[in-house]
Every structure is written in structure tokens, then in C-alpha cells.
Image (cartoon, helix red, strand yellow):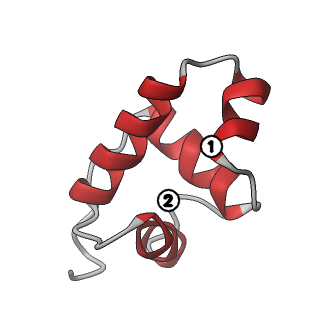
Amino acid sequence: MKDELRPELDALELRCLSLAARARTREDITREADIARDRIDDAFATATKKLQAGNVAEAIFRAVRMKLIS
């Protein structure tokens, strides 16, 4: 994926990736954000797909590299 391509991640996708980048688990995110686990799972899945990543760790790496999250 070229860095010039900037996928449109929604606020929940960005929030979940940002929290995961700070070592929060899905359970932590559920508690901290008061969002249902299935919505968090969907956010990770769609963010991973939009970033053309193979898993959440790679999605986080790509999002950081593209300066979508810090």
C-alpha cells in the first residue's frame, strides 16, 4: 500500500486502533469506551480491510506510518 493512499477511517476505527496501539485489549476498549464488543470487532475488521493489512497489528503499524494515529 502506498503512503499516498489515505483510507477514510471513521472515528470508531481510529479510536480502536489508537487504543490498541497503547496496548489496550478489546476488553479494555469495551470498558473504557462503553462500546459493545461486536462494534469494536467490526471496527477492527473494517479498519484492517481499509488499510489492506493482514491483522490488527499491521493495521496499527500502517495507521501510524500514515499519521492517521500517533
Foreground of the two, 47 or 9: 47
Percent coordinates x, y for residue 16 in the rendering? 57, 43
**Label disc, if present, on residue 10 of the rendered structure:** none
Q: Is residue 5 above or below residue 32?
A: below
**Depth order, front residue of 54/14:** 54
Q: Quadrant of residue 27?
A: top right
Left or right: where 17 falls relative to 39 = right
SS under mark 1: helix
Q: What residue type is labelled 1?
A: Arg
* Residue 53 against residue 13 in the figure, above or below: below
Q: Nearer the viewer, mark 1 or mark 2?
A: 1
Decide which of 37, 70 is in the foreground and name it.
37
Amino acid type, callout 2: Leu
Residue 32, image x, y percentages? 79, 28
Residue appearing at x 43%, y 26% in the figure:
38
Q: Kindly indicate the quadrant of the structure image that contains residue 9.
A: top left
- Residue 41 at x, y percent in the picture: 43, 38
Q: Which mark is residue 68?
A: 2
Which residue corresponds to the image point at 64% horizontal and 55% vertical from the top-left?
20
